[in-house]
Amino acid sequence: MSREQDSKEGQNQHGQNRHGQNQQGQYNEEILASMQRIFGKGFLSPGGEAEVRRVMAGLDLTDKQVLDLGCGLGGCTVVLGGALGAGSVLGIDIDDGNLAHARAAVAEAGLTETVGLQLVEPGPLPFPDDRFDVVFSKAVICHIEHKSALFAEVCRVLRPDGCFVGADWMTGAEDNLSQAYHDWDQGLRDAGLEFHFESGAVHRRAFDQAGFARSELSDDSEWACDGAVRAQAVIDGEGRRDLEAALGPAGYAAFARRCEARIEALSSGDLRYQHFRAFKED
Protein backbone atom coordinates (compact mmCIF):
# COMPACT_ATOMS: atom_id res chain seq x y z
CA MET A 1 0.00 0.00 0.00
CA SER A 2 1.40 3.43 -0.92
CA ARG A 3 1.76 6.22 1.66
CA GLU A 4 -0.93 8.19 -0.18
CA GLN A 5 -3.33 5.26 0.03
CA ASP A 6 -2.36 4.61 3.63
CA SER A 7 -3.08 8.19 4.64
CA LYS A 8 -6.61 7.91 3.19
CA GLU A 9 -7.41 4.55 4.78
CA GLY A 10 -10.80 4.86 6.46
CA GLN A 11 -11.06 8.60 5.77
CA ASN A 12 -14.46 10.26 6.14
CA GLN A 13 -14.55 12.36 3.00
CA HIS A 14 -17.47 14.46 4.22
CA GLY A 15 -15.64 15.53 7.38
CA GLN A 16 -18.49 14.50 9.67
CA ASN A 17 -18.52 12.64 12.93
CA ARG A 18 -20.79 9.75 13.90
CA HIS A 19 -23.54 12.22 14.85
CA GLY A 20 -23.50 13.79 11.38
CA GLN A 21 -21.97 17.01 12.69
CA ASN A 22 -19.17 18.81 10.91
CA GLN A 23 -15.82 18.22 12.57
CA GLN A 24 -15.08 21.84 13.39
CA GLY A 25 -12.26 22.70 15.79
CA GLN A 26 -13.05 23.81 19.31
CA TYR A 27 -10.68 26.75 18.89
CA ASN A 28 -10.35 29.43 16.25
CA GLU A 29 -7.04 30.32 14.65
CA GLU A 30 -6.30 33.09 17.14
CA ILE A 31 -6.81 30.75 20.09
CA LEU A 32 -4.66 28.06 18.49
CA ALA A 33 -1.89 30.59 17.98
CA SER A 34 -2.18 31.74 21.60
CA MET A 35 -2.07 28.19 22.96
CA GLN A 36 0.99 27.42 20.90
CA ARG A 37 2.63 30.49 22.36
CA ILE A 38 2.14 28.86 25.76
CA PHE A 39 2.94 25.23 24.88
CA GLY A 40 5.17 25.54 21.79
CA LYS A 41 4.59 25.38 18.06
CA GLY A 42 2.47 22.38 17.09
CA PHE A 43 1.45 21.57 20.69
CA LEU A 44 -1.81 22.05 22.58
CA SER A 45 -0.62 20.40 25.79
CA PRO A 46 2.47 20.99 27.98
CA GLY A 47 6.04 19.91 27.43
CA GLY A 48 6.74 20.08 23.72
CA GLU A 49 9.46 17.90 22.21
CA ALA A 50 11.19 17.40 25.55
CA GLU A 51 8.08 15.80 27.04
CA VAL A 52 7.60 13.50 24.04
CA ARG A 53 11.18 12.34 24.54
CA ARG A 54 10.52 11.72 28.24
CA VAL A 55 7.37 9.72 27.51
CA MET A 56 9.22 7.60 24.93
CA ALA A 57 12.42 7.13 26.98
CA GLY A 58 13.94 3.68 26.47
CA LEU A 59 11.80 2.79 23.43
CA ASP A 60 13.66 2.39 20.14
CA LEU A 61 11.47 3.41 17.20
CA THR A 62 13.93 2.42 14.49
CA ASP A 63 12.00 0.67 11.68
CA LYS A 64 8.86 0.73 13.82
CA GLN A 65 5.43 1.65 12.45
CA VAL A 66 3.84 4.13 14.85
CA LEU A 67 0.26 5.39 15.19
CA ASP A 68 -0.14 8.84 16.77
CA LEU A 69 -3.64 8.67 18.25
CA GLY A 70 -5.20 12.15 18.25
CA CYS A 71 -2.28 13.91 16.58
CA GLY A 72 -3.72 17.42 16.90
CA LEU A 73 -1.52 20.08 15.29
CA GLY A 74 1.23 17.56 14.56
CA GLY A 75 3.88 18.55 17.10
CA CYS A 76 4.20 15.07 18.62
CA THR A 77 3.90 13.42 15.22
CA VAL A 78 6.86 15.38 13.87
CA VAL A 79 8.99 14.47 16.90
CA LEU A 80 8.14 10.77 16.55
CA GLY A 81 8.94 10.70 12.85
CA GLY A 82 11.91 13.05 12.98
CA ALA A 83 13.97 13.35 16.17
CA LEU A 84 12.95 9.90 17.47
CA GLY A 85 13.53 8.20 14.11
CA ALA A 86 10.42 6.04 13.68
CA GLY A 87 10.30 3.97 10.49
CA SER A 88 6.89 5.50 9.71
CA VAL A 89 4.26 7.45 11.60
CA LEU A 90 0.55 7.79 10.89
CA GLY A 91 -1.15 10.62 12.74
CA ILE A 92 -4.93 10.48 13.05
CA ASP A 93 -7.45 13.03 14.29
CA ILE A 94 -11.21 13.66 14.10
CA ASP A 95 -10.67 17.38 13.40
CA ASP A 96 -9.78 18.29 9.82
CA GLY A 97 -8.78 21.78 10.98
CA ASN A 98 -6.12 20.29 13.22
CA LEU A 99 -4.89 18.13 10.37
CA ALA A 100 -4.40 21.17 8.13
CA HIS A 101 -1.91 22.49 10.69
CA ALA A 102 -0.34 19.06 11.06
CA ARG A 103 0.20 18.75 7.31
CA ALA A 104 1.98 22.09 7.26
CA ALA A 105 4.17 21.02 10.19
CA VAL A 106 5.08 17.72 8.52
CA ALA A 107 5.93 19.48 5.25
CA GLU A 108 8.03 22.11 7.02
CA ALA A 109 9.97 19.36 8.80
CA GLY A 110 10.60 17.55 5.48
CA LEU A 111 8.90 14.37 6.71
CA THR A 112 6.27 13.76 4.03
CA GLU A 113 7.91 10.45 3.08
CA THR A 114 7.88 9.22 6.68
CA VAL A 115 4.71 10.71 8.16
CA GLY A 116 1.13 10.23 6.94
CA LEU A 117 -1.96 11.99 8.29
CA GLN A 118 -5.54 10.82 8.26
CA LEU A 119 -8.98 12.11 9.15
CA VAL A 120 -11.02 9.51 11.07
CA GLU A 121 -14.42 9.29 12.72
CA PRO A 122 -14.93 8.59 16.43
CA GLY A 123 -15.39 4.88 17.03
CA PRO A 124 -13.51 1.75 15.95
CA LEU A 125 -10.10 2.38 14.45
CA PRO A 126 -10.18 1.91 10.66
CA PHE A 127 -7.15 -0.39 10.53
CA PRO A 128 -6.61 -4.14 10.29
CA ASP A 129 -5.40 -6.25 13.19
CA ASP A 130 -1.68 -6.22 14.02
CA ARG A 131 -1.04 -3.05 12.01
CA PHE A 132 1.35 -1.04 14.24
CA ASP A 133 4.35 -1.68 16.46
CA VAL A 134 3.66 1.31 18.73
CA VAL A 135 0.59 3.44 19.44
CA PHE A 136 1.33 6.84 20.99
CA SER A 137 -1.15 9.17 22.69
CA LYS A 138 -0.71 12.40 24.65
CA ALA A 139 -3.53 14.21 26.46
CA VAL A 140 -6.18 12.48 24.33
CA ILE A 141 -7.59 9.65 26.44
CA CYS A 142 -9.06 12.17 28.89
CA HIS A 143 -11.50 13.13 26.12
CA ILE A 144 -12.74 9.54 25.73
CA GLU A 145 -15.63 8.30 27.86
CA HIS A 146 -15.44 4.56 27.19
CA LYS A 147 -11.76 3.94 27.74
CA SER A 148 -11.84 0.14 27.73
CA ALA A 149 -13.44 0.19 24.26
CA LEU A 150 -10.71 2.48 22.93
CA PHE A 151 -7.98 0.41 24.61
CA ALA A 152 -9.40 -2.77 23.06
CA GLU A 153 -9.14 -1.16 19.62
CA VAL A 154 -5.58 -0.08 20.32
CA CYS A 155 -4.69 -3.59 21.47
CA ARG A 156 -6.28 -5.03 18.33
CA VAL A 157 -4.26 -2.89 15.90
CA LEU A 158 -0.99 -3.46 17.76
CA ARG A 159 1.28 -6.26 16.65
CA PRO A 160 2.22 -8.98 19.18
CA ASP A 161 4.69 -7.52 21.70
CA GLY A 162 3.55 -4.03 20.67
CA CYS A 163 3.31 -1.11 23.09
CA PHE A 164 0.68 1.54 23.79
CA VAL A 165 2.56 4.49 25.30
CA GLY A 166 1.70 8.03 26.27
CA ALA A 167 0.73 10.50 28.96
CA ASP A 168 -2.58 11.89 30.16
CA TRP A 169 -4.55 13.66 32.86
CA MET A 170 -6.19 11.46 35.49
CA THR A 171 -7.86 11.94 38.85
CA GLY A 172 -6.09 10.98 42.05
CA ALA A 173 -9.11 9.06 43.37
CA GLU A 174 -12.42 7.72 42.10
CA ASP A 175 -14.53 9.89 44.41
CA ASN A 176 -14.37 12.54 47.17
CA LEU A 177 -12.41 14.93 44.98
CA SER A 178 -11.62 18.42 46.24
CA GLN A 179 -13.49 21.62 45.44
CA ALA A 180 -10.42 22.83 43.53
CA TYR A 181 -10.73 19.86 41.21
CA HIS A 182 -14.47 20.40 40.71
CA ASP A 183 -13.89 24.11 40.00
CA TRP A 184 -11.40 23.20 37.29
CA ASP A 185 -13.64 20.51 35.83
CA GLN A 186 -16.66 22.83 35.81
CA GLY A 187 -14.60 25.55 34.17
CA LEU A 188 -13.82 23.19 31.30
CA ARG A 189 -17.50 22.29 30.93
CA ASP A 190 -18.52 25.95 31.01
CA ALA A 191 -16.11 26.51 28.12
CA GLY A 192 -17.86 23.77 26.12
CA LEU A 193 -14.94 21.35 26.37
CA GLU A 194 -15.66 17.64 26.79
CA PHE A 195 -13.49 15.61 29.15
CA HIS A 196 -13.91 12.30 30.96
CA PHE A 197 -11.28 12.15 33.70
CA GLU A 198 -10.80 8.87 35.55
CA SER A 199 -8.38 7.58 38.16
CA GLY A 200 -5.26 5.58 37.50
CA ALA A 201 -7.02 2.53 38.94
CA VAL A 202 -9.79 2.88 36.35
CA HIS A 203 -7.19 3.08 33.58
CA ARG A 204 -5.44 -0.05 34.86
CA ARG A 205 -8.71 -1.98 34.88
CA ALA A 206 -9.48 -0.73 31.38
CA PHE A 207 -6.08 -1.92 30.12
CA ASP A 208 -6.76 -5.34 31.64
CA GLN A 209 -10.27 -5.50 30.18
CA ALA A 210 -8.91 -4.55 26.76
CA GLY A 211 -6.60 -7.57 26.72
CA PHE A 212 -3.20 -6.02 27.41
CA ALA A 213 -0.80 -8.45 29.09
CA ARG A 214 0.48 -5.80 31.51
CA SER A 215 0.44 -2.07 32.08
CA GLU A 216 2.48 0.54 33.93
CA LEU A 217 1.64 4.00 35.27
CA SER A 218 4.23 6.54 36.35
CA ASP A 219 3.09 9.69 38.15
CA ASP A 220 4.59 12.91 36.80
CA SER A 221 2.27 15.38 38.48
CA GLU A 222 5.05 17.42 40.09
CA TRP A 223 6.48 18.14 36.64
CA ALA A 224 3.00 19.00 35.35
CA CYS A 225 2.35 21.36 38.26
CA ASP A 226 5.66 23.14 37.72
CA GLY A 227 4.78 23.50 34.04
CA ALA A 228 1.32 24.81 34.90
CA VAL A 229 2.86 27.47 37.13
CA ARG A 230 5.20 28.53 34.31
CA ALA A 231 2.29 28.62 31.86
CA GLN A 232 0.31 30.75 34.29
CA ALA A 233 3.14 33.27 34.31
CA VAL A 234 2.91 33.53 30.52
CA ILE A 235 -0.89 33.81 30.66
CA ASP A 236 -0.70 36.59 33.22
CA GLY A 237 2.25 38.31 31.56
CA GLU A 238 3.60 38.31 28.02
CA GLY A 239 0.80 36.18 26.60
CA ARG A 240 -2.05 38.18 28.05
CA ARG A 241 -2.49 40.60 25.14
CA ASP A 242 -2.68 37.78 22.55
CA LEU A 243 -5.08 35.76 24.67
CA GLU A 244 -7.37 38.71 25.34
CA ALA A 245 -7.41 39.50 21.62
CA ALA A 246 -8.30 35.89 20.80
CA LEU A 247 -10.74 35.17 23.63
CA GLY A 248 -12.07 38.59 24.56
CA PRO A 249 -11.76 39.99 28.10
CA ALA A 250 -14.39 37.65 29.59
CA GLY A 251 -13.00 34.63 27.77
CA TYR A 252 -9.47 35.46 28.87
CA ALA A 253 -10.59 35.81 32.49
CA ALA A 254 -12.33 32.42 32.38
CA PHE A 255 -9.27 30.81 30.76
CA ALA A 256 -6.97 32.26 33.42
CA ARG A 257 -9.28 31.01 36.19
CA ARG A 258 -9.27 27.50 34.70
CA CYS A 259 -5.48 27.49 34.64
CA GLU A 260 -5.31 28.65 38.25
CA ALA A 261 -7.79 25.93 39.26
CA ARG A 262 -5.65 23.34 37.47
CA ILE A 263 -2.65 24.33 39.59
CA GLU A 264 -4.76 24.00 42.73
CA ALA A 265 -6.13 20.61 41.64
CA LEU A 266 -2.62 19.33 40.86
CA SER A 267 -1.31 20.65 44.16
CA SER A 268 -4.11 18.87 46.06
CA GLY A 269 -3.35 15.56 44.33
CA ASP A 270 -6.87 15.25 42.96
CA LEU A 271 -5.61 15.90 39.44
CA ARG A 272 -2.70 13.77 38.27
CA TYR A 273 -0.54 13.72 35.18
CA GLN A 274 0.64 10.20 34.43
CA HIS A 275 2.84 8.46 31.91
CA PHE A 276 1.54 5.05 30.88
CA ARG A 277 2.65 1.98 28.97
CA ALA A 278 0.56 -1.08 28.13
CA PHE A 279 2.04 -4.12 26.43
CA LYS A 280 0.36 -6.60 24.13
CA GLU A 281 1.23 -10.23 24.68
CA ASP A 282 3.90 -11.65 22.38
Image (cartoon, helix red, strand yellow):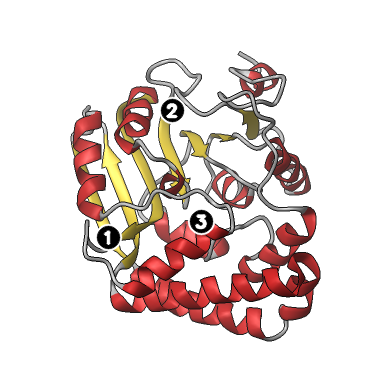
Quarter of the C terminus within the rendering: top left
Instruction: Give the residue pinned by disc 1.
Output: 218
Residue type at mark 2: give it: Phe
Which of the 4 image quarters holds residue 38? bottom right
- In the displayed structure, 279 sits above or below 265; it is above
Report the front residue among 29 and 215. Answer: 29
Name the amino acid, label 1.
Ser
Q: CA distance from mark 3 to mark 2?
A: 34 Å
Please, is residue 196 above or below residue 226 in the view? above
Q: Which residue is mark 3?
A: 189
Pointers 3 and 2 in contact (C-beta within 8 Å):
no
Q: Is residue 195 left or right of residue 31?
A: left
Q: Secondary structure at mark 3?
A: helix
Alpha carbon distance from label 1 to label 3:
27 Å
Labelled disc at residue 132:
2
Along the viewing direction, whichever of 6 and 14 lies nearer the viewer: 14
Asked if residue 223 can be seen in this view, the reply is yes
Q: What residue lies at 38% left-to-right and 17% top-to-bottom?
A: 129
The residue positioned 60% from the left and 84% from the top of the image is 233
The kind of secondary structure element at disc 1 is strand
Q: How many marks?
A: 3
